Image (tube, rainbow, N blue to C red):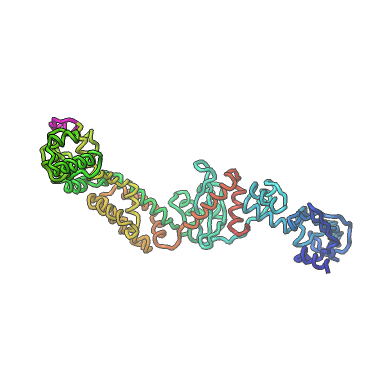
Amino acid sequence: MADVLLQDLWFHQVDDVVIEGVVSDDELVVVRARTAAIRVACPACGTTSARVHSRYVRRLADSAVGGRPALIELRVRRFRCAQQDCSQATFAEQVDGLTFRHGRRSAGLQAVLERVAVMLAGRAGSRLAQVLAAKVSRSTLLRLIRRLKDPESAIPRVLGIDEFALRKGHNYGTILLDIETRQPVDLLPDRTTATVARWLAEHPGVEVICRDRSTAYAEAGRLGAPDAVHVADRWHIWSNLAEAIEKTVVQHRVQLREPQDTATAATAAALEGLDLDSASAEPRTAGRLSERVREQHEAVHALLDQGVPLREIGRRLGLARNTVRRYAHVASADELLVGRWTGRTSILDPYKPYLHQRWAEGCTVARRQFEEVRERGYPGGENVVKVYVAKLRAGFPPTPPRKAPSARDVTSWLTRHPDRLPNDQAQQLKAILARCPALDRTAHHVRTFAEMMNDRQGKHLDQWIAQVQADDLPALHTFVTGLGQDLDAVIAGLSLRYSSGAVEGQNNKIKMLKRQMFGRANFDLLRKRVLLTARGRS
């Protein structure tokens, strides 16, 4: 019964193998087995034979058992071929699902290591293999990847073409993708017209080619697949339009800044007729001076109520006669705590409107304001201006002027859907378009183009181009000239549902695989990993 359980456990998918025993220790599990097939087919001619030539033992590393490495000691036979004219006189038997020629691992462990290699490649895969109790070097894993066969793929009807960087700024390759299945078809070692055209000629059947605005790929498509329809990617078209818009915005960047008149007028209106000195008309309510005055006032009036003369009060309290008289003549101490210069004219009065104006314009530095009013004839000292500016700062805390939007900001606002703009940005854009007619016309052309692109109305492109050419917008004229050089592909891109979005996604995956291999993988290894990973081999 135990033998049957072991048989089902180890070789449940393998026929004609019999377990003779299992030996285990703290470091290794050894399974001793033998083949039991009566007749075996010759791998060269296919003739079955039962004539045993010899026997030998194969040692196969297998998947770990209980965290310990497993080793299969399999006793196999070598047969004589029954076909006399066969080129292979003898042959060793292979067990399907367990052995393969020259293999020193079981087929199951080999499949696991292949998956680990495709997922993680060298060093990382080797570390994971150690966790799985299957010690293997990084170089061995890379060899496993290279020995794997390329996955079979049908010739795509809709082909996506794009470049990717092998070494950014130096070497570039080409990725070919089936747009309908979103699976990579092949990777080419460069991005030249001849290489891409040769691949297209060797794989006939491509009906639609999705690409960017590259002239090299356009020419390769015309040479290798002359009957294919070219579709320019909408994202690249919109990106080119955004570049033209930014150039137009830069030409009118002076008008991006909000005029100072509006903000200045609002602050100046608040400052108009302001009398900051009136704040001193309020009595002091705190401080040592106010407390002393209130105590002395109360003491003076207490003695007055007792009939004590003013001279005697001064002697008792240690106060001057005039001070006692001043306390005696007021009913409340608050009358003594009001600034004595309230309502008086100041040497700064003629210059206060100018100070208010400069404050509204954002000049809040007392030293600078003093220098400016001195140039206008102010005869006083700097301290008077400092005191008054401090009162302005207390009553009107300075707010930094709104930063003018950059050319990139405005370009972003023009190329986004109006309903997705925050209210603040929408108001700023509306004010800019009102100040700059050229940008207002540009915004109109952009909205028209966006509607045409979203509604797949590429047939109206000629009409849009004519409207732009009739307008005085040089940057958009350059954009239109570029569209004319690849007009059929652009019209197809604005009309058909195909795009290169899936290709861009595969480009990101290629970058991830390159980083995983520290950028040191050869092209053949990178190609294998891209194709096998996409086919679910990992």
Magenta highlight on residue 375: yes
Region rendered in magenta = 370-381
Q: Looking at the image, which is closer to me, 262 or 92?
A: 262
455 in relation to 123, above or below: below
Q: Split into 4 quadrants, where in the image is the C terminus?
A: bottom right
Q: Is residue 491 left or right of residue 287?
A: right
Towards the viewer: 135 or 454 = 135
On the image, the x and y values in percent for residue 331 come to: 13, 45
Describe residue 478's horizontal placement relative to residue 55 as left or right.
left
Residue under the image location 15 percent in, 37 percent down: 313
Q: Residue 80 placed where, x, y %? A: 87, 59
State the residue at coordinates (25%, 46%).
255
Residue closer to the observer: 61 or 500: 61
Inspect this view and state whether residue 470 appears.
no
Q: Position of residue 317 (x, y in %)?
A: 19, 36
Q: Residue furthest bottom?
A: 1
Residue shown at 82%/68% (left/top)?
Answer: 4
Q: Is residue 323 magenta?
A: no
